[in-house]
Image (cartoon, rainbow, N blue to C red):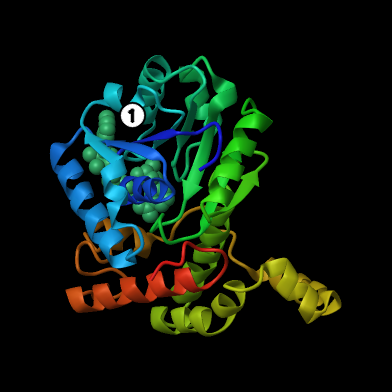
Amino acid sequence: MIEGIRKVAVIGAGIMGHGIGLEFAEAGYAVAITDSSPAALDAARDNVAATLAERGKNAGAIDQIVFTTSLEDAGRDADLVIEAVSERLPLKEQIFGDLDRLAPPHAILASNSSSFMPSQMAPFTKRPDKVVVTHYFNPPHVAPLVEVVKGPETSDATAELLRRAYDDMGKIPVVVQKERLGFIGNRLQMAMFREALSLVSDGVCSVEDLDTVIHSSIGRRWSVAGIFEVFDLAGLDTVLAVSRALMPDLSNADGPPAWFVEMVEGGDLGIKSGKGFYDWDSAHGEEARARIRRGLSVTGKTNAVT
Ligand SMILES: NC(=O)c1ccc[n+]([C@@H]2O[C@H](COP(=O)([O-])OP(=O)(O)OC[C@H]3O[C@@H](n4cnc5c(N)ncnc54)[C@H](O)[C@@H]3O)[C@@H](O)[C@H]2O)c1
């Protein structure tokens, strides 16, 4: 724990919120997790208990978490609030306005939004210097990175307190100095996805072969070294020549291809509907989730998860 943060309130107890809350509890903070849906809170309590048992370190951490449907109870006395409700801007605007009234004036108000920027939530508060995005990757208690995204009015003190808190609890924080849609990780991922969709659309390869290329080559490299480090090792003269040859040929589509839109609008949503780019049954889903969790936990500074 670090000085300046004692109680953490997490708003939204879904996929992300329960994992964010459980990790702060493991680190010794008092945590309140709130959700407008009692069923979501019940599921979160079960998920937190199961995950803590699986991690086998600090099953008692659940006693430091209060589960409540009251935003007021959760926000009261909080030093840090992390909003993780559904990705709808009007909802986030309303919650930031409510939290500004309910949380103590010194509290940092953070959002785990995947796409909205601090400047979109800050105007609904009287503390724009304390509004920030803390963007986790799923599963939040396993993936080490948190992007701490500063808006134009976010203070250095706010970003620095969060950077120290995450560092102290074994996460890997990166402070994103200038807000930009998608921050860093999702921009990189979407740039790659655009090219992947284009290669499959053009019949260059199958979905399966493209995924194999990623996890048997560049994905393995990138799990241990960043793109700039890898290219320094390759020789920048070569990298420049390849950049000049390939960049003009890469996809610059300004939206997803029609076949992908039709697929999603037709109900192929991935694992949650049983079919996406792949066919999913529950055994395949469990195996893939476990494989990804293992992969995420073996590199970098992690909380020694299983
Ligand atoms: N799922 C991911 O991979 C991922 C990754 C990074 C960031 N995010 C972001 O995290 C946030 C949450 O995503 P998620 O996947 O956990 O969603 P989710 O749907 O699993 O959970 C959202 C929760 O918010 C609750 N909620 C809705 N309105 C509320 C209100 N007024 N007050 C309190 N609770 C309310 C819902 O009941 C639900 O339990 C989103 O902003 C999303 O973009 C998600």
x and y, in percent, of residue 141 in the image: 40, 56
Q: Secondary structure at mark 1?
A: helix
Q: Is residue 149 above or below residue 234?
A: above
Q: Give the camera-side residue of 293 and 303.
A: 303
Residue at 35% x, 22% y: name it.
Answer: 76
- Which residue is disc 1 drawn over? 91
The x, y position of residue 199, in whole percent, is 50, 74
Q: Is disc 1 surrounded by few (<14), some (14 to 19) or many (20+) residues within 10 Å?
A: few
> Which residue occupies 51% across, 19% down?
123
Say if residue 151 shows up in the picture: no
Is residue 126 shown left or right of residue 74? Answer: right
Judge whether 118 appears above or below 251 on screen: above
Q: Quadrant of the C terminus?
A: bottom left
**Amino acid found under the numbered disc labelled 1:** Leu
Q: Position of residue 14 (x, y in %)?
A: 27, 46
Q: Quadrant of residue 278?
A: bottom left
Queried on whether the Cβ of the residue with tag 1 lies below 8 angstroms from ligand 1, the answer reads yes
Ligand 1, by image quadrant, is: top left
Would you identify the image quadrant in which residue 148 lies? top right
